[in-house]
Image: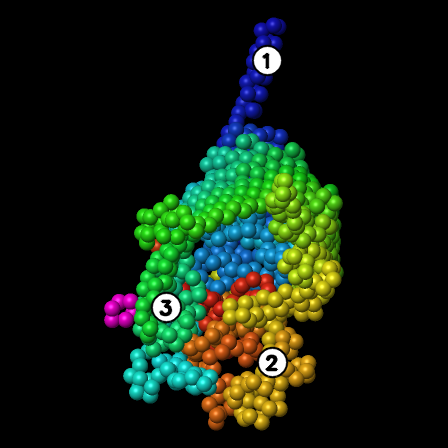
Amino acid sequence: MKFKLITVFVMLLSYIGMAQETKTISGTVTDTADVPLPGAQLKVQGKEIFTVTDFDGNFSLEDVVEGDTFRVTFLGFQPTDITIDSQNQYSIKLKEEAAALNEVVVIGYGKAESRDLAGTISNLKAEEINDSPTTSALQAAQGKLPGVQVVNDGSPGSVGNVRIRGAISVLGGADPLYVVDGVITQDISGIANSDIESFDVLKDASSTAIYGARGANGVVLITTKSGKGKMKISLSSTTGINTLVNGVDMANAQEYARYTNEALVRGGNEPAFSDAEIGGLQTTDWMDQITREGLYQNYNISVSGSKEDVDYYISANYLDEEGILKDNDYERLTVRLNNTYHLSENIRIGHNVSLVRQRGFNPSFANFTNAYKQSPHIPVRDENGNYRSTNVNNVGNPVANIENNKNVNEQVRILGNAWGEIDIFDWLTYRSSLGVNVLREKNRSYGARYIVANESGNQINNQNQVLTIRDYDEERFNWDNFLTFDKKFGKHDINLTLGLTSERIASEVLEASRRGVPPSDNLLYLGVGEQEGQTITNEGDRSSRLAYFSRLLYNFDKRYVFNATIRREGSSKFAESQRIKYYPSFGVAWNIDNEEFFSNQNFLSNLKLRGSYGLVGNDRIDSGLFLQLIDFSAYPFPGGVAIGGSSIQQYDENLTWETTTELDLGIEFGLLDNRLSGEFTYYDKKTDDILFPLALPQTSGDDSFVTNAGSIQNTGVEFALNWSDVSESGDFSYNIGFNITKNENELTNINPVIANATPFIDSGNLENGQIVTRTVEGNELGTFWLYKTDGVFENQTEIDNSAQPGAKVGDFRYVDTNGDGSITQTDRQYMGSYQPDFYYGINLGVTYKQVDFSTSLFGNSGNKVFNGLRAQRFSGENIDSDLFGERYTGGNTNGGPAAFNEVPLPSDYYLEDGDFLRVNNITVGYNFSDNILEAIQLSRLRVYATAQNALTFTKYSGFNPELPRGILDSGLELDAYPTTAKFLLGLNIDF
C-alpha cells in the first residue's frame, strides 16, 4: 500500500512538472491592414514577463507556460488579451479605437489623444522636421501652424522669433517657453532636426496653465527620439549653397555724383564732382564686394533600437554653414544619447542628454547698411593697397571692417535629464525627473589697426586695437515629481496628474577689455594688452521657482470632455507678499461624432466643439526690481568721515506678476472619411498688471522704474483646412493645407502711477537722433510714430503759406496735425505696426510611386515696415536707383524730395507695406524601390533636391520684408540680414 502511494505521488509530481514546463513563444503584432506596430507592449498577467515589439512588429516571450494570458497594448488601439495554448507562433492584429482616429499630443507632464482635450494644440509631424534642411525646427514650422508666427532673418545659426497669438508683454519677453524632453530652456538652436520625434505647441490658457508663470507666451514641447525594435542605422547628408536674392538696385557712380552735386548746391555748397569727372567714374558694387555664395553642409548619423532591457538612441549631427556675408560662418556639433532601462516590468529609468558645441564668426550686420550707403565712385582699395573712403560722406569701408574686425562666439551646452518611473499599479505611475541646462559661452571681439585713405590723406582706424572678452555662464535645474492616475470605469475615463516642480537659475557675466593687443590669432588674450585704460564688469542673477500642480482629464463615453488644471506658483523675483500666485483653468469639449444620432450620416466623419478659459502668468524680469538699492559714499569733514547713501533705483515693493486670462472657443471637423479636415478657433486674451518701465521726471534722480502699470489685449481667429487623399492602388497620394490667423493687438491701458511719469516707450532708433516707434495706450505694441508728408514744396509761395518757413523748394511738406503753425513732435501720427492683419501658410505634398514633391509658402498681410536704409541719412550717402529716379528736380512730381544732405525727419515716405508671400520650400525627392533596397541591403534610400526662400513676392523696396527685432521695434530695416536662399542636394539612408 505504501509503495502504491509513493508511485501515485511520483506520477503526480511528474504530471505537474510536465504541465508547468516553460517555453518561448514568438510572433508579430500588426494593425488590421497588416502594418507592423513597433513598440507595442506585451505583458504576461501576474508575472514579471514583459517585452516590446521591434521595428517590424516582431516579439518573443520567454519562460511562459500554457494557460498564461498576456495583454498586447499600443497607444490608439484596443488592448487585446491572448491566452497561450499549444502553438508557439502568434499573429496578432490590433483594432484601432474609434475615438483614436486622431493624433496623440504631448501636453506637458504627459500625453493624451487630442480628442480627449478641450484646449488648442498644434503640432508638426516628425517627418516635416526631420527632412527639413533648416538650422532649427522653428524654421521648419514657418507657415504651417495657425496662431504661430515665426519670423527669421536667415543668418547662419539664427533660430527666429516666435509669436504665439500676439505679443502680451513689454518687458516680459514675447518668446514662448521651450520644453525639451521635460527640460526648460530658452534656446533650441542646439537641437538637431533629425533628433525630433514630436513638436507640439500649446496655445491656449487651458493647455499652458500647467506651466503657470512660464506659459503666458505659449509653450513649445519638443520630444526627441528614443529607441525601439531591432537596430536601425540612419545616415543623412545635405549639401548646397546660400545665395543672396531680392537685391536692391543702387545708384551707379554717375547717378550718385549727380545726386550729391544737387544736394550740395541746394545746401549752398560747391559741387563735389565736375561734369568731366562724372563721365569717367567707375562704379563699385559694395554689396557684391562683401557677399558671397556660402557653402551649407549638414550631416547626421543615428543608431537606435532595443536590446534585452535597454532601449537606446545615439546620434551625432554636424552643421557647417557659411553665410552670404563674408567671414560670417556657423558650425554646430550635437551629440545625443537617449536610453531607457527596463529594470523590471514596472520600473524604468532613463536619460535624454545632448552635448552641443557651437561656434559663430559674426561680422557686424551694419556692414550691409554701410554697403548700401557707401559711395559707388570709390574703389575698395587704392593703387597703394590701402582701403578707400571719401570725404563726401562719413561711411566706413565695409570690406575693411569685415577683414579687420573679428567677433567670435563659442558655446558649449549640456541639455538633458535623468528620470525614473514606477508603475505602482497598472493605473498609477510615479515619475521623477531632474533636468539640467548648463551653458558656457565665450565671446571675443577684436579690432585690428588698419589704414584708410581718402581725398585728404590717410587715417588710421582701430588705433587702440581693443580686445574685449565676455564670458557668460548659466545654469538651470528643474526637478519634477508627479503621480499620474489613469483608469477607466465603465464609460468614464479619468486621467489625474498631481505634481511638484522646482527650478533654480543662476547666471553670471564677466566682461573685460584691454587695448594694444597685437593682431595675431595666437595673441588674442587680455594678458598681452595694456593695463592702462582696461575695463572690467561683472554681473549676475539668481532666481528660483517652486510650484504645485494638478490636472484632470475626464471624458464620458468618448463624447463629453472636461479638463481642469490648477497650479500654485512661487517666484523669488517678487517680494514675499507677492510671490505666490494661483493659475486655474478649465475646458469642455463635445465629440459630437460619437453620438448615436451622428451615425446615421456619412458626410461628416468628425465633429468636435470645444471651449476653455484660464489664467497664466509671467515673471520674466530681472531679479531684485522690487528692492531699493543704495549707493554708499564717504564724505570727509573736519574731525572725521561721514558715510552717506543715496537711492540708485526707484522701486515698487508691491511689484507682482503679469497675469493673462484667455477665452478660447473652437470647432474641429472632418468630412468625407476625414479626407477633408479643419478647425476654426476664436480667442480673446487679456494681460493685466503688465510690467512697464515708466519714464520719470528728471527731478526724481532716476530715468525710469518698473511697475505694474497697464493692460494688453490680443483678440483673434485661426482657421486651418487640410485635404488629403490616396488612390486605390496606393501609388498616388496628395495633400493640400491652408491656414490663416488674424490677431488684433492693443495696449489698452497705462496707469502712470507716479505724477508726471511718461506713459509710453519710444523705440526704433535710427542712430541719427531719430526714433520711429512709440508704444502708447490705444495702439499696438511698436506702433510706427511718424510725420505725415503731403508732397513736396514746388514754389516759395507754398512755403510762405505753410508751417515750415525755413523749408526749400523740393523739401517735404509735412502735415501740421495739431494746426499750431509749426512742425514739432506733436504733429507725429500713429501709422500701423509690423504686426500683420493676417499671416498665413499654404502647404502642398504629392507622391507618385517613388517620387515625392512638396512645397510650402507663407506670408503676411496688412503690416508695415520702415526702410531705415533710406531714412538713415547724414550727408553724402548713396541712394537706391528708385529713390534717384523719383527725386524732385523741378519739373517732375514723382513724390520724392529733391536731393538733400540733412538728417530727414522720420516720415511715412519711408514707411511701406510689409505684405509678402514667400516660397519657403520646394523639394523633389526619389525613394528607391524595394527591389533595389533588397539588392543593396538597405531599408531606405532617398535622394532629393531642395530650394528654400527661392522666391519672395513683395512690393517692399528694401532687401527683406521679414524683419525680426525686439517687441517694440520689429519691422525696421537697419543693419538687417538680406533675404538668403538655399539650393541643396540631400541623401537619406536607413540600414
Q: Which of marks 1 and 2 is nearer the N terminus?
A: 1
Residue at figure coordinates x 67%, y 53% from the top left: 650
Give the magenta range.
381-386
The residue that mark 1 highlights is 9
Q: Is residue 17 above or below residue 279?
A: above
The residue that mark 3 highlights is 397
Q: Mark 1 packing: few (<14 Cα in 10 Å), some, or many (20+)?
A: few
Q: Nearer the viewer, residue 513 or 837?
A: 513
Residue at figure coordinates x 62%, y 57% from the top left: 171
Residue 374 place in picture, x, y as percent:
39, 73
Residue 934 place in picture, x, y as percent:
36, 51
Task: Look at label 3 and name its amino acid.
Answer: Asn
Query: Tag count in the figure?
Result: 3
Q: Which residue lies furthest to the front in this view?
A: 638
Q: What SS does tag 1 mark?
A: helix
Q: Is residue 935 above or below residue 385?
A: above
Residue 36 place in picture, x, y as percent:
50, 48
Residue at figure coordinates x 59%, y 52% from the top left: 177
User: Which one is closest to the eye, mark 1 or mark 2?
Assistant: 2
Residue 450 place in picture, x, y as percent:
33, 62
Q: Mark 2 packing: few (<14 Cα in 10 Å), some, or many (20+)?
A: many
627 falls in the magenta region: no
3D distance between C-alphas at marks 3 and 2:
34 Å
User: Which one is closest to the eye, mark 3 or mark 2?
Assistant: 3
Q: What SS does tag 2 mark?
A: loop
Discs 1, 2 touching: Cβ within 8 Å: no
3D distance between C-alphas at marks 1 and 2:
108 Å
Task: Look at label 1 and name its amino acid.
Answer: Phe
